[in-house]
């Protein structure tokens, strides 16, 4: 029976805050390229139906990844935002796929069990978009998940675009989504760059879905540690320390191939 879900991994970023000549997703954690942790998790969800979006040092990232994994690659030639990155991946998603799980190549601690809950909840509720959200004491710097007066998810607003009232919201976007493929293709074509960054935000598919009466929901987590994004050498050290204290791998996702 064919797998009905594919994973798209965003791995094209420049990673300028890493202050390194190496592509961000190739920085190593305990001797393993960061993106391998994400790929290993993705395999458990979708097998080989994985599309890695590359851009910065694309050839080196491809060479490194293909040494261990069988995936498709999509090239994002210009850094025009996360929405544009996913749009680059759409042509490479296999035809039989019905839902797309979107992950970030610089978030290596997320567990397959968490993603499986997101995917199952998405399917059971027959949603068009499911967002993995995290409750944080200090949400500064993160996109806020916005709910309407009836408790329905209506938008995700980035920190730079948020009002003072919205900045008080503690429910933040992890950057991980499960989206019905047919709606994803439709919504990506409706994105614009009317925001502070002048980019195509993937988060806008939530607002688009809400405005078009689509079914949107969240899986809320309180374990912020799982969703730490590596954007600096300090972040890399933090994630390395977390994995070291867990015996070189999160027990629930240990894979002898890597560890």
Image (cartoon, helix red, strand yellow):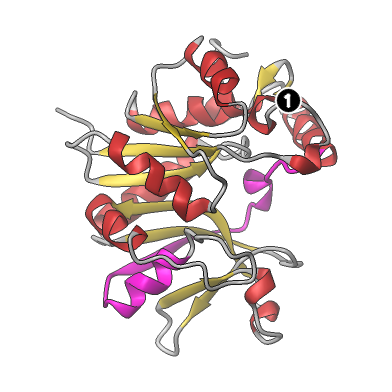
Q: Residue at x 68, y 71 (%)?
A: 160
Q: Residue at x 67, y 70 (%)?
A: 159
Which quadrant would residue 50 be assigned to in this image?
Answer: top left
Q: Residue at x 47, y 46 (%)?
A: 85
Q: 10 Å neighbourhood of mark 1: few (<14), some, or many (≥20)?
A: some
Where 119 falls versus 193 (above or below)? above
In the rendered image, residue 226 lying in the magenta stretch gets the answer yes
Viewer can see residue 210: yes
Which quadrant would residue 186 be assigned to in this image?
Answer: bottom left
Residue 109, position in %: x, y?
62, 37
* Side of 88 where 34 appears, left or right: right
Q: Residue at x 62, y 26 (%)?
A: 57
In the rendered image, residue 147 lying in the magenta stretch gets the answer no
Residue 219, position in %: x, y?
46, 59
Of all residues shown, which one is farthest toward the bottom? 149
* Side of 224 where 155 appears, left or right: left
Q: Which stretch appears magenta?
A: 204-232
In the depicted view, which residue is nearer to us: 78 or 243? 78
Q: Secondary structure at mark 1?
A: loop
Viewer can see residue 117: no
* Residue corresponding to mark 1: 22
Quadrant of the rendering where the C terminus is positioned: top right
Quadrant of the rendering where the N terminus is positioned: top left
Figure disc tally: 1
In the depicted view, which residue is nearer to us: 163 or 192? 192
């Amino acid at each position: 029976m064919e797998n009905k879900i594919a994973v798209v991994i965003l791995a094209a970023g420049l990673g300028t805050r890493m202050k390194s000549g190496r592509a961000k997703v190739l920085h190593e954690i305990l001797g393993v390229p960061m993106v391998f942790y994400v790929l290993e998790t993705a395999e458990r969800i979708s097998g080989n139906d994985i599309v890695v979006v590359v851009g910065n040092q694309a050839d080196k990232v491809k060479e490194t990844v293909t040494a261990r994994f069988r995936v498709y690659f999509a090239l994002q030639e210009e850094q025009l935002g996360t929405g544009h990155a996913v749009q680059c991946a759409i042509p490479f998603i296999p035809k039989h796929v019905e839902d797309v799980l979107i992950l970030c190549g610089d978030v290596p601690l997320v567990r397959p069990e968490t993603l499986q809950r997101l995917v199952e909840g998405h399917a059971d509720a027959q949603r068009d978009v499911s967002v993995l959200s995290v409750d944080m004491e200090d949400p500064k710097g993160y996109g806020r998940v916005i709910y309407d007066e009836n408790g329905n998810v209506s938008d995700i607003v980035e920190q730079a675009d948020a009002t003072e009232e919205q900045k008080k919201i503690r429910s933040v976007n992890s950057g991980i989504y499960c989206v019905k493929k047919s709606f994803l293709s439709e919504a990506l074509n409706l994105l614009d760059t009317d925001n502070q960054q002048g980019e195509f935000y993937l988060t806008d598919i939530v607002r688009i879905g809400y405005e078009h009466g689509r079914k949107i929901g969240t899986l809320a987590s309180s374990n912020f540690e799982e969703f730490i994004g590596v954007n600096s050498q300090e972040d890399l050290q933090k994630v390395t320390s977390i994995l070291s204290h867990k015996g070189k791998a999160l027990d629930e996702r240990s894979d002898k191939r890597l560890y």
